[in-house]
Amino acid sequence: MALATDTETAPTTETGGIAGDRLRSLVERIERLEEEKKALAEDIKDVFTEAKSAGFDVKVLRQLIRLRRQQPAEIEEQETLLDLYRRALGM
């Protein structure tokens, strides 16, 4: 007796030109990734809680992380504009 393959048990279906199996596969992958993203977000939240309990300022940590993602030229441009705006406001 031969074993049935996935294509034998679940034939490819098309509705309106859309491959149902392919669509289902994509949706399931996205759902799994969304779950992973949710778990990662919770892990990040826990790390920020740990940092806060260790006496670190979470707002400053978030700003530092944002800066580390940027290119040095972008950071310099933002700092220059910030300085210009401060001087314009007399700060």
Image (tube, rainbow, N blue to C red):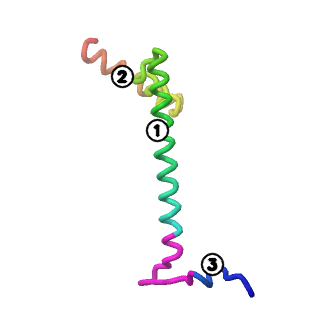
**Residue 59 drawn above or below residue 91:** below
> Which residue is label 2 attached to?
82
Dot 3 and dot 1 residues touching (CB under 8 Å): no
Residue 12 drawn at (x, y percent): 55, 82
Residue at the limit of the structure toward the right, as seen here: 1
Which residue is farthest front?
Answer: 1
User: Residue 70 appears at what percent x and percent y?
Assistant: 50, 33
* Distance CA(mark 3)–CA(mark 1): 36 Å
46 and 27: which one is in front?
46
Give the distance between the C-alpha atoms of the residues marked 1 and 2, in whole angstroms: 33 Å
Say which residue label 1 marks: 42
> Sequence-wise, which precedes: disc 3 or disc 1?
3
Residue to which mark 3 is pinned:
6
Q: Position of residue 20 (x, y in %)?
A: 48, 77
Quadrant where the N terminus sits is bottom right
Q: Circle 3 sits in a helix, a strand or a loop, which is it? A: helix
Q: Nearer the viewer, mark 1 or mark 2?
A: 1
Q: Residue at x 63, y 78 (%)?
A: 6
- First in sequence: mark 2 vs mark 3: 3
Task: Look at 49% across and 47% down and name the residue there.
Answer: 37
